[in-house]
């Protein structure tokens, strides 16, 4: 299912066993972080699945406002015994996560499979 969130921004939503997989596609920069996160919450609520993997390999930048909204979404999902995991960040976006000291709150998983399993090589973060 494709959800159009705004100009040049859409989410491709797939349902996996106990997880929703959301691939974020955007033409340029992410604007309207609150709108994106509200839509993610709405999708989770409609499916009654509060475990989301957010695929972000198409992002060119990771604005701090978007990161803070993702942390708030993660907390909201956790209240429903859910989780938020991200995967596929570019080195530039991963560096932005490190600069905001959010790598432990929002660890980047290299692959979708690692995100679903909750595993990644966190030692790579420390050596980048």
Image (cartoon, rainbow, N blue to C red):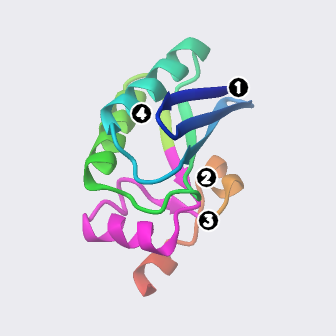
- N-terminal of the pair, mark 1 or mark 3, is 1
**Residue depicted at x 53% and y 22%:** 44
Q: Which residue is mark 4?
A: 36
In this view, 22 is above or below 65: above
- N-terminal of the pair, mark 4 or mark 1, is 1
The CA distance from mark 3 to mark 4 is 22 Å
The CA distance from mark 4 to mark 2 is 20 Å
Residue 81 seen in the current view: no
Quadrant location of the C terminus in the rendered image: bottom left
Query: What number is the disc on residue 105?
Result: none
Residue 121 sits inside the magenta stretch? no
Residue 70, horizontal then vertical, whole percent: 36, 42
Residue 90 sits inside the magenta stretch? yes
Query: Regarding mark 2 in the picture, which secondary structure is present there?
Result: helix
Quadrant location of the N terminus in the rendered image: top right
Residue 84, horizontal then vertical, whole percent: 48, 41
Using a 10 Å C-alpha cutoff, classify the residue at mark 4 as few (fewer than 14 neighbours), some (14 to 19) or many (20 or more): many
In this view, 105 is above or below 5: below
The CA distance from mark 2 to mark 1 is 21 Å
Query: Regarding mark 1 in the picture, which secondary structure is present there?
Result: loop
Q: Which residues are magenta?
A: 85-109
Residue located farthest toward the bottom when viewing the structure as drawn = 127
Give left or right: position of 24 versus 107. Answer: right
Observer-nearest residue: 119 or 4? 4
In this view, 48 is above or below 112: above
- N-terminal of the pair, mark 2 or mark 1, is 1
The CA distance from mark 1 to mark 3 is 24 Å
**Residue depicted at x 65% and y 47%:** 116
Q: Which residue is mark 2?
A: 115
Query: What number is the disc on residue 110?
Result: 3
């Amino acid at each position: 299912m494709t959800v159009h969130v705004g100009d040049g921004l859409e989410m491709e939503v797939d349902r996996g066993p106990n997880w929703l997989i959301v691939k974020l596609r955007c033409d340029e920069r992410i604007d309207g972080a609150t709108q994106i996160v509200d839509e993610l919450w709405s999708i989770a609520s409609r499916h009654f699945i509060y475990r989301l993997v957010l695929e972000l390999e198409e992002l060119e930048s990771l604005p701090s406002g978007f990161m803070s909204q993702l942390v708030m979404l993660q907390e909201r999902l956790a209240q429903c015994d859910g989780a938020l995991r991200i995967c596929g960040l570019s080195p530039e976006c991963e560096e932005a996560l490190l600069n905001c000291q959010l790598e432990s709150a929002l660890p980047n998983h290299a692959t979708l499979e690692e995100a679903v399993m909750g595993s990644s090589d966190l030692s790579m973060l420390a050596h980048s």
